[in-house]
Amino acid sequence: MDLLTPARPTPNIGHMQRLSGLDASFLYLETAAQPLHVCSILELDTSTMPGGYTFDRLRDGLELRIKAMPEFREKLADNRFNLDHPVWVEDKDFDVDRHLHRIGLPSPGGRSELAQICGHIASLPLDRTRPLWEMWVIENVGGTDAHDGGRIAVMTKVHHASVDGVTGANLMSQLCSTEPDAPPPDPVDGPGGGSDLEIAISGAMRFATRPLKFANVVPLTLSTVIDTAKRVRSGTTMAAPFAAPKTAFNTNVTGHRNIAFVQLDLDDIKKVKNHFGVKLNDVVMALVAGVLRKFLLDRGELPENSLVAMVPVSVHDKSDRPGRNQVSGMFSRLETSIEDPAERLKAIADANSVSKQHSSAIGATLLQDWTQFAAPAVFGVAMRVYASSRLSGARPVHNLVLSNVPGPQMPLYMLGCEVEAMYPLGPIFHGSGLNITVMSLNGKLDVGIVSCPELLPDLWDMADAFQAALEELLAAG
């Protein structure tokens, strides 16, 4: 599913929308050290904006768009008598000015200054009493004057309880258009309100059905376990959790975030894909593998065993469950122990083929179903236990999260400004303090890197290594 394809809407429960267990898990797992929102940095050319750029004109355009985007006007509602997960309700006091902010970069306004301020913004938690999103308009990018047709950056921040990769892309598609002067869409009604009594009653009704749902989940889980056991014997499984070697970014994180980003030519990546007869995602993973191998070699810290990435997999087209997070995941070996880039790419492609078959054999809704049963306290205790195990030196579940979001291959305009880049930025977790997310957009591959400065003080060496890794693969072909 790409950026301009709408995600399946979440069905209403009365006039409220109940969070799924997977949606709510991102609320329950969130701590001061582990904020769980997803971000993106858009670089925009203001010269295409009809009438010329002003902040007020951009603000007014955003306000019109949000009238057609009820997700941006919804906030959480819960109470002590609710036995199920929270609900989304309309924020009757919604004010766009509480979510839209304007700042300017210090001179010279380059990538370092932009990344520094965006890292700070990514460190700040969202206000749970309001709709869970923010947008920061950043001027003086590259020392240009946005009012004279220069550039601005826009950083968006949305809580993971509200979006996964697909639903987040869907929200961005509604803020963007294929023409700079496209009219705003027609207004859309929100979910309305919900009294404490309604929230409690509907929650009790859902809670009462859990034993039946649990009985349905157990057989699917058992069949998955049996199938995985057979695959282990035949050597056709994905990489196992807790088999990843420990690196500098596999320990507990703090609440600070640092960011780097880079843009690559998508045609070059397709040349590599076509030459070796692999998938585009295989090439992306090989690029990341090459970057991380060099990064760890330069530090004298390359493990003998391959790094393992957790790759989110969308199941929007396979799931009939409610909720905005419709994802599964697979563990993929990056084959960082292989020196030759061509051999490494082929090994990654072969391992991915096995991983995809194993992932497909696992029920698409299994993760969603199991998270539906866990209470907030369970998530909290589990995270504290896991964080403690990190301090005692336990092996990580995986080394990093690596995600690939396909976007449209055409010019896009956000509120009249042409989108020159869209760098996606995912969350990091205790034990997995590195996230690399890529998005293909209009002939480019935009790479966003997020970590914690206490673990990886400077990410630019990693970002700058992507072009070298791509040239290495081109030369190998």
Image (cartoon, grey):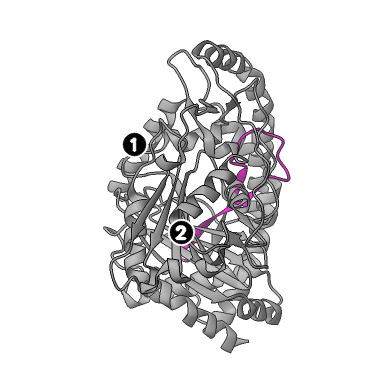
Residue drawn where x is 72% and y is 35% of the image: 320
Callout 1 secondary element: helix
**Residue 219, above or below 308:** above
Amino acid at circle 2: Thr
**Residue 199, above or below 148:** above
- The spot of residue 175 in percent (x, y) is 59, 51
Q: Is residue 132 covered in magenta?
A: no
For label 2, the crowd category at 10 Å Cα-Cα, with few meaning under 14, some 14 to 19 and many 20 or more, is: few
Residue drawn where x is 63% and y is 46% of the image: 229
Instruction: In the displayed orientation, state which residue is furthest to the bottom.
Output: 475
**Residue beneath disc 2:** 54
Residue 458 in which image quadrant: bottom left
Q: Nearer the viewer, residue 345 or 94?
A: 94
Residue drawn where x is 61% and y is 20% of the image: 210
Q: Is residue 307 covered in magenta?
A: yes
Quarter of the figure with the C terminus: bottom right
Kindly report the secondary structure that dominates the magenta region of the rendered protein: loop
Q: Nearer the viewer, residue 411 or 34?
A: 411
Task: Give the mark nearer the N terminus: 1 vs 2.
Answer: 2
Q: Residue 384 got which mark?
A: 1
